Amino acid sequence: MPPLLGCVLLGCVLVTLFAPGGLLRRDEPPPAPAGWSPYDLAGSIQAVQVRLRRHPDDAAAWASLGDMYLKQARRTADTAYYAKAQGAFERSLRRPTGDGEPYIDAVIGMGALANARHDFAGAVRWAERARKAAPFRWALYGVLTDAHLELGHYERAETALRRMLDGHPDLASFTRAARLEQLRGRPGPARDLLRRACAIPGDPAEYAFCQWQLGELAWSTGDPRTARAAYTQALAADPGHAPARAGKARAEAALGRTEQALRDYATAVIRSPAYVVEYGELLEHLGDAEGARRQYAVFAAQQRLLAASGGVDGLAAGTFAANHGDPGTAVRHLRAEWARRHSVEVADALGWALHRAGRHTEAAAYAVRADALGGRNASFAYHRGEIEHALGHTGAARTHLTRALSINPHFSPAGAARARELLAETT
């Protein structure tokens, strides 16, 4: 991966923030959401729906409703909101505007929806359509950044994000910049960007999203205590934020607070079934095989419903099959996903599936690619270590397994235990 933003981010954005007379001091913490009332996105959706019953030709209101449905999908991880968002955006696109052109926020919204559905090539098409019509609508560059990143087009992602930062440095651009810095293996700059993003005034949902990302960063660097604090901050602003609830459960399990972890996972999966596999893996690790099977059955039902509606999530289906099902099926899912996008997550998952299918030499090529491009990722390092062990490369296996545990000793209940077991065997 070429250097991502480097001096552009840290030499321009952060210097502006920290300079004398700038927006923030370096030691200034993100403000807590004191005084905020519980976030009520459902109430906001209802209010727009009431307006649309009175003004059904309001293109802006339809686009706003679609955006709210996407926000609800993000905070609950419930893909059922995607169809609602699509319907609202399409209604907006059909409404007449003064110049006869489609309402541009609906065009951008369709791009964001395509990203959410993993149709990254489609997202690029929608964003480019928006750019031709309104090149100074900065949100479109966020759609382009996300899509190109997932497609493995890192230089294009950097270019789009630089344009977004130059035009409108805000929470949306800073959080994307942080992700790129993390992919470079630079958690410090990523943390600075996220903390500064959290300090930008916004609504409780934006604050919760930012704090959740801080929690994810802390978790990925092996700091479950700091991660738990950030997830708790996110939930204080938005108690219904399912990703933060699941993250808090994950951190609690790492800290030995097993009962609290199980309660938080149970709450998370009620709010969103996206975390049933993660919950099931913890139950399995704790010896509750029947509880794990129930969670895995929910995941299988989800995938059947998704397929019946024409959707596809080859990454999730393939990862599950590699770990809990048929490795051959996993390889088929992930080869199809790799044909759609060359992201580091897909490279890692395909390499792991090939390894589980006994094709270790082929697996190693994907594992090396993911590990080289994926920043400091404990799971990627562990998978590479397992593959090297299967190939009989004991020294390389020890190097990568040790590195995985040094990055995050809690990266996976089963994976971390297996890494320690292999290291003990080869001592």
Image (tube, rainbow, N blue to C red):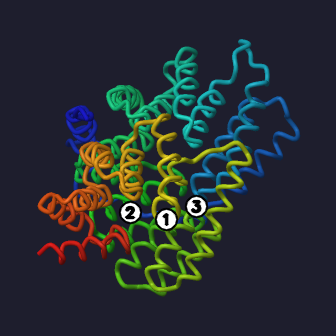
- Residue type highlighted by circle 1: Ala
Where residue 244 is drawn, which disc sits there?
A: 1
Dots 2, 3 in contact, CB < 8 A: no
Check the picture and name the quadrant holding the N terminus.
top left
With respect to residue 216, does 287 lie above or below? below
In the image as oriented, which residue stretches furthest toward the right?
A: 54
Separation of residues labelled 1 and 3 (CA atoms): 12 Å
* Image-based side of 207 in relation to 412, left or right: right
Residue 50: image x %, image y %? 83, 46
Dots 1, 3 in contact, CB < 8 A: no
Residue 279: image x %, image y %? 52, 73
Separation of residues labelled 2 and 3 (CA atoms): 18 Å
Where residue 215 is drawn, which disc sits there?
A: 2
In the image as oriented, which residue stretches furthest toward the top?
A: 99
Dots 1, 2 in contact, CB < 8 A: yes
- Residue type highlighted by circle 3: Ala
Residue at 51%, 62% (x, y): give it. Answer: 243
Q: How busy is the neighbourhood of tag 3: few (under 14 within 10 Å), some, or many (20 plus)?
A: many
Where residue 274 is drawn, which disc sits there?
A: 3
Q: How busy is the neighbourhood of tag 1: few (under 14 within 10 Å), some, or many (20 plus)?
A: many
